[in-house]
Amino acid sequence: MKATYGFRATVTARPGKGDELVSLLLSGTSGEGPATNEDCVCFLVGRSVSNPDVVSIWEGWTTKEAHAKNFASERAKSFTAKIAAVVAGDGRYEEEVPIGGKWATGGTP
């Protein structure tokens, strides 16, 4: 599948909550997490080397509408509420279109 919509977000966890935030985000890639949706073609989580409470998320979706539909679901709303509970303030959010690149086979670095 090809991604035609995506975004990059950088958020700061409450002090000392970076590990919890990363764990919550990565839980979205298994079970019934929002990133298990077939229209989600990329979901990556990273963190700052200098500040482990600063976390970045990259997502790629088949369409903007598919992303919106998925995150309008009750399970996605519950997921984002858990994340909001450990985030301090507003994050930076930038819509972008994934073009290409490389990712190791198997899905995890």
Image (cartoon, helix red, strand yellow):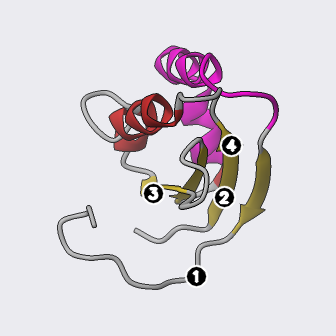
Q: Looking at the rendered structure, which numbered label has been put on residue 11?
A: 4
Q: Indicate left or right for 104 with 97 as reference.
A: left
The residue indicated by pointer 3 is 44
Spatial CA distance of label 2 from label 3 is: 9 Å
The crowd level at tag 4 (other Cα within 10 Å; few <14, some 14-19, many 20+) is many
Quarter where residue 32 is shown:
top left
Quarter where residue 31 is shown:
top left
Q: Please give the name of the residue rendered at 52% of the width and 24% of the height, measured from the top-left corner.
A: 76
Tell me the element at label 3: strand
Spatial CA distance of label 4 from label 1 is: 23 Å
Q: Looking at the rendered structure, which numbered label has been put on residue 99?
A: 1
Does residue 8 sit above or below 14 in this rendering? Answer: below
Amino acid type of disc 4?
Answer: Val
Amino acid type of disc 3?
Answer: Leu
Spatial CA distance of label 1 from label 2 is: 13 Å
Q: Which residues are magenta?
A: 65-90
Quarter where residue 66 is shown:
top right
Of the numbered discs 1 and 2, the one sitting upstream in the chain is 2
Foreground mark, 4 or 3, reads 4
Of the numbered discs 4 and 3, the one sitting upstream in the chain is 4
Amino acid type of disc 1?
Answer: Ile
The residue indicated by pointer 2 is 8
| Quarter occupied by the N terminus | bottom left
Does residue 51 sit above or below 72 in this rendering? Answer: below
Q: Residue furthest left?
A: 106
Residue 37's spot in the image, x, y percent?
Answer: 39, 42
Along the viewing direction, whichever of 44 and 42 lies nearer the viewer: 44
Amino acid type of disc 2?
Answer: Arg
Spatial CA distance of label 2 from label 4 is: 10 Å
Along the viewing direction, whichever of 81 and 99 lies nearer the viewer: 81
